[in-house]
Amino acid sequence: MAVAPEQTRGVIYEGTRIPSPIPTVLRVSDELTATGDVMQVNFGPNHPSTHGVLRLIVDLYGEDVVGLEAVIGYLHTGFEKSMEQKSWWKAITYPERVDYLSFQANEMAFVMAIEKLLDQDIPEKATWMRMCLCELNRIHSHLVWLGTAALEIGAISMFWYAFRERETILDLFEMVTGVRMHTRYFQTGGLAEDIPTGFYAQARAFCDQMPKGVDDYEAMLDKNKIWLERTVGLGLLSADDAIALGQSGPALRASGVNWDLRRDQPYLAYDQVEFEVPVYYEGDVYARYRCHMEEMRESTKIIRQCVDRLEKMNGEPWIADNRKVVLPPREELHTSMEALIHHFKIVTEGYRVPEGEVYVTIESPRGEMGCYVVSDGGAKPWRVKFRAPSFVALEATATCMHSGFIADMIAIVGSLDTVMGEVDR
Amino acid sequence: MSYEGVPGLVETIEAHGETTLVVDPARLLEAARHLRDSLGFNFLSDVAAADYLGWGEGDVSGYIGTRAGRDLNHPATFGLQAVPATKPKRFSMSYHLLALGPNARRVRLQTWVNEDEAVPSVIEIWPTADWHEREAWDLMGITITGHPNLKRILLEDDWEGHPLRKDYPIGGEPVRFSEAE
């Protein structure tokens, strides 16, 4: 299944640009400091183009960025510690809030980790529905990225266009789960509820609408001279540097590395759907933008295939029948003492997860989302650690900022697609 | 894939379809370099520190509420009653590696330390380890030697203690600027 990452076509740049000795800090050279013309500026933490609360300490020589250090932690809320205090099924609500744009992907990483520890299989319907929602979520996240990243470099109207399709996706989420964001729909063993009637028709309508939407965005940006000037050739990152810096997702694929976990280490049923992995070889902001656009088209294809499959599964179970982990069906509670006991036990004590440690990775909209979970055999996670793709993406800022202007910095930080909630956790 | 030649290898554990290589912290760098250069693990996905304080004692598993309160480990409750296994030392550092490329595979490189012991930095092997190691120091208090910029990353510079440690008090954070000065 796995396909070899292709080598970069042409060379983005020779050698490495990762600063030394600290890979994430760009230091001002002594000659420049000696000129006395270097000015240090605090960019953020409260700045509209920092995607939340990112603080960049920037050294400027004229308009050239000659030094850069990213300071994070302003949004640290201790999710990982909080999860240790909750029973397993209550903890599922946390990962969604870690990254408030790709809530379902994060939720799924954690649920999959629990299932891996429990050795719990999920019904086919749940597998396909998870895939369907995760792809909708990918589009949702990319749309917000597109809207805000374009907004930051002056393409204000993109925001409204992107939010038009985003609204349709949120409506779909609301239809399925009852809430628009932070859906808490994936349950250990499957899904929390059956798929509502009417979802398929609406999802299909969305699949028809979405490619036209992407056409619109491309029509506004692809040949837009301002957009091209502000994105092409900026924020270069070579394939080797991207791998060394642990980059993943669109940022990695825009540097010419043909790697996507959905295809190369398939989970759910990604090995049963057809889709392409867009790869670009320029390693600049524009290539990252192109990757996002292509991925939205590919995700639409996957959603369509999921809906086709799901439609044939009417009446099939959506959650595993494991009474030690999964709540019994509501109607059984009125007639079965056994069901009532199980219900009571799971709700009050929570279920127990066998002792062990697992690491689950999925391809979230932002790249490789990892979830490391340790269980002591009890009703609460002992340790949860997220490998947040945004956190790692920000490590590349210093490398990408190589001989850039301060105005480019906005485009470059934006192109790395970070969500500060996930960076700081 | 054979991991026989990994320097300082103490133990190889296979569980849940994942391979864990436990190595001696003193030889961690050698092991890391061997894994990257000879076995193709070019991508460091994550560095995760975990605190196993109290493992092997009786009442850790599955309690809800206080230690003095209701004991759900009483044999009358369902589920797993086993006391968790004693671990070699208090902290584990797990490096989740990926061989990105054809024949992709993952492995967990793990090393164990106590409070007074340090782990060498793997920055020179995988530059991405920079922030991960700072986080391990910040939240778990793992001392990293050879890190060029080891300071707190998510918490403020003057924060006391390491919150992800299991003996860190929960809900006991002092409120700032609350006293009349």
Image: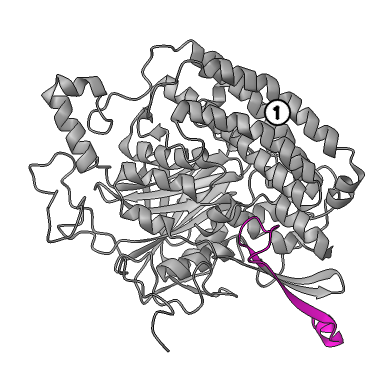
Relative to A39, residue A142 above or below: above
Q: Is residue A385 magenta?
A: no
For residue A57, which quarter of the picture? Answer: bottom right
Residue A212 percent location from the top left of the image? 75, 24
Q: Circle 1 sits in a helix, a strand or a loop, which is it?
A: helix
**As drawn, which residue projects farthest toward the right?**
A225
Q: Is residue A117 left or right of residue A423?
A: left
Q: Nearer the viewer, residue A396 or A46?
A: A46
Q: Residues within 10 Å of mark 1 (few under 14, many from 20)?
A: many
Relative to A231, residue B157 above or below: below
Number of residue marks: 1
Q: What chain is tagged by disc 1?
A: A
**Label 1, on which residue?**
A297
Residue A163 percent location from the top left of the image? 67, 37
Q: Nearer the viewer, residue A72 or A219?
A: A219
Residue A71 percent location from the top left of the image? 61, 68
Q: What residue is rendered at 56% in x and 14% in y?
A: A308
Q: What residue is rendered at 64% in x and 58% in y?
A: A394
Residue A74 percent location from the top left of the image? 55, 65
Highlighted range, magenta = A27-55
| Residue A1 seen by the camera | no
**Badge 1 amino acid:** Arg
Q: Is residue A26 left or right of residue A112?
A: right
**As drawn, which residue projects farthest toward the front?**
B180
